[in-house]
Image (cartoon, grey):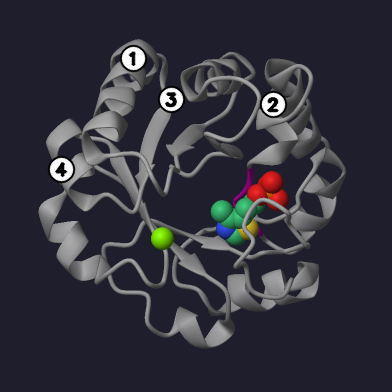
Amino acid sequence: MIGAVYVVTDPGAPIPVLDQARAAARGGAWAVQLRDKTASDAEIARLAETLLAELAPGGLRVFVNDRVEVARATGADLHLGQGDGDPRAARERIAPGALLGLSVETVAQCAAIPEGVSYIGAGPVRATATKPDAAAPIGTDGLARIVAAAPVPAIAIGGLTAGDAPALRRAGAAGMAVVSAVTRAPDPEAATRALVTAWRQR
Ligand code: TZP
Ligand code: MG
């Protein structure tokens, strides 16, 4: 149910968000997340509807970050940060078949993962320039501790590249999420494919 490669889009990257998502889908990503702190709900909804119509039929999961009502209105999946409001309330608002993700930075936060959360985003595993307010990196050891404490699959995030895939798998992650490794790559589709290939290698 949770796939290997999850690409989070970045409106600050060199190519448009829709093209980032399309490249990720062509490259074999399991999911994309629309993450934009400043766009309006209407803009995010329009992007989500476009991606759902184009790419969900091929199996891509489409998440919106921190927009409960956009997820409800479009049928998209939802990802929440720790400060984004009550995941239980969000679960009640979104479609029964929609996935719900929650960011987790510490083992302590694993005790507060309510039923109805589908996966956690665990990190930042490594230092990241993409999220200036990110907590200190937890490393693959910290990731393994969170994996052990969490009642749901963990998707690693933060400063990750294809070379990290083996260590993330050893730590027990269900998948890996990236922003810059795909959205700022010279060839985002090839970069996504490289992540998928690295994840499958064993
Ligand atoms: N949450 C924790 S780290 C991060 C988010 C959204 C940013 C990851 O970006 P990158 O470019 O893959 O380091
Ligand atoms: Mg948030």
Could you give the CA–CA distance between mark 2 and mark 4, rounded to whole angstroms? 28 Å
Could you give the CA–CA distance between mark 2 and mark 1, rounded to whole angstroms? 19 Å
- Whether residue 155 is visible to the viewer of this picture, yes or no, is no
Which one is nearer the viewer's eye here, 193 or 115? 193
Could you give the CA–CA distance between mark 3 and mark 4, rounded to whole angstroms? 18 Å
Highlighted magenta segment, given as a residue range: 173-178
Residue type at mark 3?
Leu
Which badge, 2 or 1, comes first in the chain's sequence? 1
Residue depicted at 47% across the width and 79% down the height: 110
Residue depicted at 61% across the width and 39% down the height: 4
Q: Name the residue under label 3.
A: 60
Which badge, 3 or 4, comes first in the chain's sequence? 3
Ligand 1 closer than 8 Å to the CB at disc 1? no
Q: Mark 4 points at which residue?
A: 72
Ligand 1 closer than 8 Å to the CB at disc 3? no
Q: Quadrant of residue 152?
A: bottom left
Task: Tell me if 110 is positioned left or right of 133 in this view.
Answer: left
Which badge, 2 or 4, comes first in the chain's sequence? 4
Q: Give the label on residue 97, or none.
A: none
Magenta part mainly helix, strand or loop? strand
Above or below, comparing residue 122 to residue 182 in the picture: below
Q: Give the label on residue 57, or none.
A: 1
Task: Tell me if 201 is positioned left or right of 183 in this view.
Answer: right
Q: Name the residue under label 2.
A: 192
Could you give the CA–CA distance between mark 2 and mark 3, rounded to whole angstroms? 13 Å
Residue depicted at 45% across the width and 43% down the height: 35
Residue depicted at 52% across the width and 34% down the height: 11
Above or below, comparing residue 30 to residue 141 in the picture: above
